[in-house]
Image: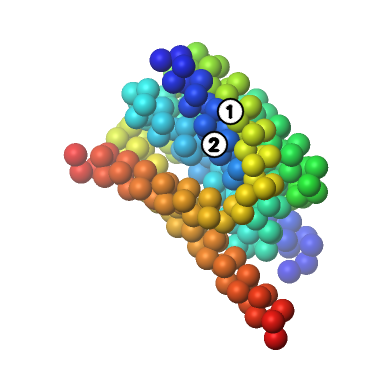
Amino acid sequence: MTLIILLLGLGVGVLVGLLGIGGGVVLVPAMVYLLGMDQHLAQGTSLFILLPPIGLGALREYWKQGQVDLRPGTLCALGMLLGAYGGSLVALPLASRHLKGLFGCFLVLSAILLWRKGQLEDGFAAAKGESARG
Amino acid sequence: MGKKGRDAGIFLVACICGIASGMFGIGGGVLLVPLLGLLFGFSQHRAQGTSLVALIPPTGVLALMAYAREGFVSWNTGLSLIPGVFLGGILGGRLAERLQPRRMRQVFAGVLFALGAWQAFSAWWR
């Protein structure tokens, strides 16, 4: 069991670095389905895991490549601190079942956003290729 | 859009990501990365690096306290997950420099979609 948990952490970490996300979006369903946790418990535990700067190693790699914008990053941190507290006040009184369903809907929405972003980039790349040829 | 307007817009978007973060116990990067790109024209690598900055300070601390008050935190499981996530993050950061992340992201989007649909289904229709 401990081995599963350690490996799960490593796998999620690779996604953190690869996609620049916190990892909670994968951690929560993994804890619900692999470890059999209740939805609320999985979400609280995920917030705990995200507390230390687990993305610091990944951030260093991006920093070396000059791919970091500090000012908007800081603004986002501030906004998320406030927003997260508001969000927790909404989630805590909900029944676990409904929270689980909402979480599912949220995943679907994020998936669509991620996918659309990919398509836009395909569009840009095609336009660039054309102008370079022309 | 002026610089001030852009900053205000980014702050507003971050608040929305934060609400999702507290509601669903996640970091919020999964929303922040595509939104920085779609709304503010960040390149993919830059959006990811900037999102990681936003995830360094303990932005979820207030939400965590609210969950902890209700007893919804498994401290032991959390502690065993942290080292792996940290090490994996370094690995993933190195990989991201080499990979064309678009394909990777689309695969991830597909997995998320399936996972989300399954979770909503099992919560409400079973």
Q: Which residue is mark 1?
A: B85
Q: Amino acid at mark 2?
A: Gly
Determine whether A98 is above or below A129 in the image: above
Q: Quadrant of the C terminus of chain B?
A: top left
Q: Residue at x 41, y 24 (%)?
A: A41
Residue at image x 64%, y 34%?
B91
SS of the residue at dot 2? loop
B38, above or below A107, in the image:
below
> Residue B69: in sight, yes or no?
no
Q: Quadrant of residue B54?
A: top right
Q: Residue at x 76, y 36 (%)?
A: A60
Q: How is the image coloured?
A: rainbow
Q: Residue furthest bottom?
A: A134
Dot 1 crowding, Cα within 10 Å, few <14, some 14–19, many 20+: many
Near-viewer residue (A65 or A105): A65
Q: Residue at the spot x=30%, y=44% of the render?
A: B118
